[in-house]
Amino acid sequence: MSDPTQRSAGPAGDRVPIACLIVFVVVWTALAIAPRYRADWLLENLLTALVVPALVLTYHRFRFSDRAYVQMTVFLLLHTVGSHYTYSEVPLGDWVRDALHLSRNHYDRLVHFLFGLLFLRPLRELTLGDARGLGRVATAWLSIASIATLSLSYELMEWITAVLADPEAGTAFLGTQGDVWDAQKDTALALGGAILALLLEPSPKRPDLS
């Protein structure tokens, strides 16, 4: 029996992942030109520089579903926009803040929520596979726990990096905008996104690659 994690044979099976990679590279390259704060841009792209090459290099050993590739690409594009402007100064967030008379730019909060919403499926495919033997409750718990662990790890990484970096870059990287509970709220939003994703896609089966 063939391994369901393997990609479809032939160029047609590669179409979506290749398209996702091309779109990401084009947008990332364009936004790498003259970012608002180069030091913050470098910090924000540390994980991108690890994750994207890893996905490319391991593609022939482990293939995600087409939908997972699209969702990861959407998230990485949003992160790339945030790294170009810094999350606290993304123009769209400023526009929403002014239009709704909010106290801060919430673009970073949106991206944390979408991390949970968009990355639950890829993480389930990567870590759980065909998880029917675990049962729905165990699968749901492990899926949410995976998002929570990654979200918490990112917040810890932000803190450590900000301490080690120069003050200006560290402050821009944290993007707390004066909120002492920023890290907790970001993690809560990621969990909320993951729970919504779980409700929208409750089946523990790994989706097919079509």
Image (spheres, rainbow, N blue to C red):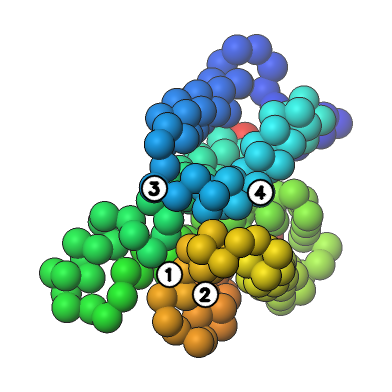
Residue density around tag 2, few if under 14, some if 14–19, many if 20 or more, within 10 Å:
many
Q: Which residue sits at x=42%, y=60%?
A: 87
Q: Which residue sits at x=43%, y=56%?
A: 86
Q: Which residue is mark 2?
A: 186
- The quarter of the picture where residue 154 lies is bottom right
Q: Are marks 3 and 4 in contact (CB under 8 Å)?
A: no
Is tag 3's residue or tag 4's residue first in the polypeptide sequence? 3
Where is the C terminus found, in terms of image quarters?
Answer: top right
Q: Are marks 1 and 3 in contact (CB under 8 Å)?
A: no
Q: Amino acid at mark 4?
A: Leu
Q: Amino acid at mark 3?
A: Arg
Q: CA distance from mark 3 to mark 2?
A: 23 Å
Q: Are marks 1 and 2 in contact (CB under 8 Å)?
A: yes
Q: Which residue is mark 4?
A: 47
- 105 relative position to 2: left or right: left
Q: Which residue is mark 1?
A: 109
Give the label, 3 or 2, closer to the camera. 3
Pick the residue in front: 47 or 142: 47
Give the label, 1 or 3, closer to the camera. 3
Give the label, 2 or 4, closer to the camera. 4
Is tag 1's residue or tag 2's residue first in the polypeptide sequence? 1
Is tag 3's residue or tag 2's residue first in the polypeptide sequence? 3
Q: Amino acid at mark 1?
A: Arg
Percent from the top left, x then y, of residue 10?
65, 12
Residue sitting at the far top: 10
Q: Which residue is mark 3?
A: 36
Where is the N terminus found, in terms of image quarters?
Answer: top right
Percent from the top left, x then y, of residue 83?
47, 50
- The quarter of the picture where residue 65 lies is top right
- The quarter of the picture where residue 157 lies is bottom right
